[in-house]
């Protein structure tokens, strides 16, 4: 059985933006849990609300078959440029003690107009960040996927996935990693 770790932010964790107290969608509406159910793999959810790209890589168990990394949105929301976020991502990824073929970098879906996203430059920055991630993955020899191509529907805030968005994300990811 494959062991997969999903390392990300609130969209990995399954945050429900309708909840003011930090609630989560139910498991069958979270992309990480859908991935586990569809594949039968052991899938660890290492998502955390508000997580920016860490300065150092966490200890990933050596028996991990696939590490899925999707980060960067919070970095952009905190004012980092796409280039600065990509540099941070590079330091993070090169600090991992996993073979490159065991790492999948996912560029988050671009931000959309909403309560948290009120200016066009931020939306443009999220699109630029996706291109930076593609370039970085190629340079590091790791796998890459662009979630901006998966029709992930954003919630009213322009940042978080809706339940349907989680399902679309899971469907796109499953196509990317199908054996």
Image (spheres, rainbow, N blue to C red):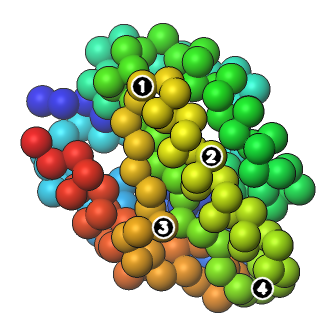
Question: Who comes first in sequence, dot 1 or dot 3?
Answer: 1
Pointer 1: what residue? 141
Quadrant of the rendered structure where residue 3 is? Answer: top left
Q: Position of residue 42 (x, y in %)?
A: 24, 37
Label 1 to label 4: alpha-carbon separation: 37 Å
* Element carrying mark 1: loop
Q: Residue at x 50, y 24 (%)?
A: 140
Picture layout, residue 128 above or below residue 149: above
Q: Is residue 155 visible?
A: yes
Pointer 3: what residue? 148
Quadrant of the rendered structure where residue 130 is? Answer: bottom right
Question: Who comes first in sequence, dot 4 or dot 3?
Answer: 4
Q: Are marks 2 and 3 in contact (CB under 8 Å)?
A: no
Depth check, mark 4 against mark 2: the one in front is 2
Residue at the farthest right position: 79
Q: Position of residue 55 (x, y in %)?
A: 75, 26
Pointer 4: what residue? 115
């Amino acid at each position: 059985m494959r062991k997969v770790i999903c390392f990300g932010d609130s969209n990995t964790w399954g945050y429900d933006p309708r909840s003011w107290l930090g609630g989560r969608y139910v498991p069958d509406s979270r992309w990480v849990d859908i991935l586990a159910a569809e594949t039968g793999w052991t899938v660890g959810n290492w998502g955390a609300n508000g997580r920016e790209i860490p300065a150092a890589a966490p200890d990933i168990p050596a028996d991990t078959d696939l590490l899925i990394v999707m980060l960067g949105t919070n970095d952009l929301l905190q004012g980092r440029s796409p280039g600065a976020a990509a540099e941070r991502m590079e330091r993070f990824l090169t600090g991992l003690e996993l073979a490159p073929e065991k790492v999948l970098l996912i560029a988050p879906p671009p931000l959309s107009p909403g309560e948290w996203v009120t200016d066009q430059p931020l939306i443009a920055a999220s699109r630029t960040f996706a291109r930076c991630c593609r370039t970085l993955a190629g340079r590091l020899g790791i796998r890459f996927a662009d979630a901006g191509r998966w029709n992930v529907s954003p919630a009213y805030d322009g940042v978080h996935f809706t339940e349907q968005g989680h399902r679309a994300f899971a469907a796109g990811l499953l196509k990317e990693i199908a054996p």
